[in-house]
Structures are given as structure tokens and as C-alpha cells.
């Protein structure tokens, strides 16, 4: 029994306190700040604008159909009114479907364009974290560290290192 108590006392005295240095990186900030990320954002914005113009044009056509219908509905018979309303409703549904399709296209395009950048960011985060001597690095928005005795924000260093290594 004395032996166990002595052993526990020695362990409690001789065990050093464990300190953990936490690193944090805002990946979204990195994505929008690196040169390559800005190019992707500009390409996506251009594609979005093209799609928006198509949708705006079709929406204008629908408005014109609705205005024409309003003017002509007074002299139309009931059957013609129903047919015209169905036609307008179908155009609206088609426009909504096209809009959803465009959104999906842009999301897929964004995923494909950002994937290689995210892979390279991961490599840079690993290198920067090792160089900074942090024990663990968290992505700020998905796993925010509420409290850490010691923490380092590595975001600006990651941006700088990424652009040094991958800017074209």
C-alpha cells in the first residue's frame, strides 16, 4: 500500500503540465482571398450573369404574355381564356425549372472549380501549422474553438503561402 501511494505521489509531482497550442484558419476567407480563388469567383460571377440574363429575358416574355392576355381577355371566350392562362402558367413553371437547373449547374461548377484549390489549401495549412508549432488546427467556421489558452490565427499566413506557391 505504501508503494502505491508513493508511486502516485511521484507521478503527480513529476508529470509535466500538458499545454496545447491551437491553430485556427478561416478557409472561406482563404478561398476568397487567394488569387486563384478570386479567379474562380469571377468566372462563377460571369456564368451567373449569363444565366440571369437568360432568365430575365424569359421573364420579360412572360410579362408581355400576361399583359397581352389582360388586354385581350375581355373579348376572349371562356375556352380561349383557359387555354391562354394554361399557356402562361406553363411558361412560368418552365422558367422556374430552368432557374433551378441553372442554380444546380453553378453549384456543380463551383464545386469542381474549388475542389483542387481546397486540396492545395489543406497542404498549405499542414505546412503552416507545422512551421507555427501548433498541435492542432481547426477550421474557424465549422469547428469554432470557444476557448483555448494558447491559439494562433493562421489564416493570413495560409493566404500568403498559397499565393507564393500557386499564383500563376
Image: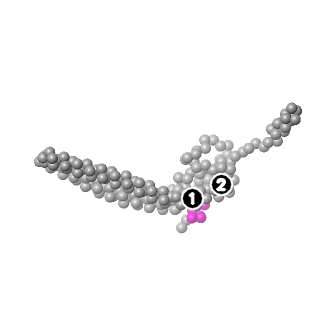
**Callout in the foreground (1, 2):** 1
Secondary structure, mark 2, is helix
Establish if 6 lies above or below 119.
above
Density class for disc 1 (Cα within 10 Å; few <14, some 14-19, many ≥20) is: few
Residue located farthest toward the right when viewing the structure as drawn: 2
Query: What residue appears at the point 58 percent right and 45 percent down from the top-left corner?
Result: 143
Q: Nearer the viewer, residue 75 or 64?
A: 75
Prevalent SS, magenta region: helix
User: Over which residues does the magenta segment extend?
Assistant: 161-166
Kindly identify the residue that appears in the image at 45 percent across and 56 percent down. 108
Name the side, left or right, on which 98 lies relative to 161.
left
- Residue 33 visible (yes or no): no
Classify residue 122 as left or right of residue 55. Answer: right
Q: Are marks 1 and 2 in contact (CB under 8 Å)?
A: no
Residue for badge 1? 119
| Disc 2: which residue | 129
Q: Position of residue 21 (x, y in %)?
A: 68, 48
Alpha carbon of mark 1 to alpha carbon of mark 2: how far?
15 Å
Is residue 168 among the parts visible in the rendering? yes
Could you tell me which residue is drawn at 15 percent across and 49 percent down? 80
Sequence-earlier tag: 1 or 2:
1
Q: How many marks?
A: 2
Q: Nearer the viewer, residue 89 or 143?
A: 89
Where residue 71 appears, as percent x and y from the top left, is 16, 49
Is 31 contained in the magenta span?
A: no
Residue nearer the viewer, 168 or 136: 136
Amino acid at each position: 500500500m505504501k508503494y502505491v501511494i508513493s508511486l502516485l505521489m511521484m507521478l503527480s509531482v513529476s508529470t509535466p503540465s500538458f499545454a496545447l497550442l491551437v491553430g485556427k484558419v478561416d478557409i472561406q476567407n482563404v478561398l476568397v482571398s487567394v488569387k486563384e480563388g478570386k479567379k474562380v469567383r469571377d468566372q462563377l460571377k460571369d456564368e451567373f450573369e449569363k444565366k440571369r440574363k437568360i432568365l430575365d429575358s424569359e421573364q420579360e416574355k412572360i410579362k408581355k404574355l400576361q399583359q397581352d392576355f389582360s388586354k385581350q381577355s375581355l373579348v376572349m371566350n371562356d375556352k380561349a381564356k383557359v387555354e391562354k392562362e394554361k399557356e402562361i402558367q406553363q411558361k412560368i413553371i418552365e422558367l422556374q425549372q430552368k432557374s433551378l437547373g441553372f442554380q444546380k449547374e453553378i453549384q456543380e461548377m463551383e464545386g469542381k472549380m474549388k475542389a483542387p484549390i481546397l486540396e492545395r489549401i489543406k497542404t498549405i495549412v499542414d505546412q503552416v501549422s507545422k512551421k507555427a508549432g501548433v498541435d492542432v488546427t481547426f477550421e474557424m467556421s465549422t469547428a469554432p474553438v470557444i476557448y483555448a489558452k494558447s491559439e494562433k490565427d493562421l489564416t493570413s499566413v495560409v493566404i500568403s503561402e498559397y499565393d507564393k506557391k500557386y499564383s500563376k
